[in-house]
Structure formats: structure tokens, C-alpha cells
Amino acid sequence: MKNFFQVLVFILMTGNITSTLAQEKLDASIVADLQKTPKYAFGVTDDFHFKGVLGLYDTLVENGVEIEAFEIVVKGKIVSELVKGSDLESYFQKYQGKVRVSVCSMAMKKWNVIADQLFEGLIPVPTASIRMLQLQAKGYNTLSY
């Protein structure tokens, strides 16, 4: 199942993220398989994958996949782009309350970002690795980029 999920995400992310991805029609068998595990978590380190995973969220919803929980765990230099007034803040607005974004506190420290600088809806966590392990323990489908 994990390999199937990884292939699905790769296929969906290879197109134009902002337009094609949200219009992807999934086969009924894919939707049926995805309904079996409705919690998803993605580890990302750049804005390309951040936006791609948000596009994947749109695709799943538009294809009738019921999502119990959807989380992006962010680490790396992208943390410096998750601040108030950034392009990513306006991009993320439509996902407020739908997608949880956890931000690695270790990356925040490395890139000199404090919690007050993060835009609304972002939640600092001790480390991205620990958060991903916690989500796996809770039964999430997980992928990291």
C-alpha cells in the first residue's frame, strides 16, 4: 500500500501543480483504496513540495476521498519562507482549518525564525522527525520529500 501511495503522489505531483493537479480525475479503485486509511502526513523541505502536497489535498477532496486528517511537517530552509506577509502565507489561506502544518523548531532555530513570525495556522513542534514518527504511530500514511 505504501508503494502504491508513493506512486500516486509522484504521478499527481509531476504535472502543473497549481492547475493540473487539482483537476486530476482519479480512478474509482484508487479512491476506494485511499478511503481505507484517511489520515495523511507529508514531510517537506521546499516550497515546490509544500504547494504540491496542498494540490494533492485538493485532488483528494475533489475526487471524493474522505480525509480524517491531513498534515504537512516542514523542516529545512523553507521555514524562513513561512512568515507573515510571504507568498506562501497567501497561498495557504484557502487551506486554513483544513490542513495542519507543523514546523520543526530546530529548523526555526537554524534559520532564525521565531514562533511570532510564523503566519497563522502553523504549529511549531520539537523536531520534524519526532513529529513524523508520532504520526506514523497514530496510523497516518506518511511520505517525506
Image (tube, rainbow, N blue to C red):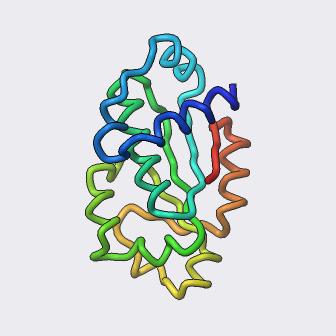
Residue 91 lies left or right of residue 135; in this view the side is left
The one of 9 and 60 positioned closer to us in this rendering: 9
Q: Residue at x 41, y 53 (%)?
A: 51
Q: Residue at x 70, y 43 (%)?
A: 136
The one of 76 and 123 positioned closer to us in this rendering: 76
Residue 143 lies left or right of residue 79; in this view the side is right
Q: Residue at x 54, y 75 (%)?
A: 77
Residue 20 lies left or right of residue 15; in this view the side is left
Residue 106 place in picture, x, y as percent: 65, 77
Q: Is residue 58 above or below residue 116?
A: above
Residue 131 place in picture, x, y as percent: 66, 57
Residue 54 lies left or right of residue 90; in this view the side is right
Q: Is residue 36 above or below residue 43?
A: above
The one of 17 and 87 positioned closer to us in this rendering: 17
Identify the image quadrant of residue 127. bottom right
Q: Residue at x 41, y 40 (%)?
A: 15
Identify the image quadrant of residue 129. bottom right
Residue 49 place in picture, x, y as percent: 49, 54
Give the quarter of the figure containing the N terminus.
Answer: top right
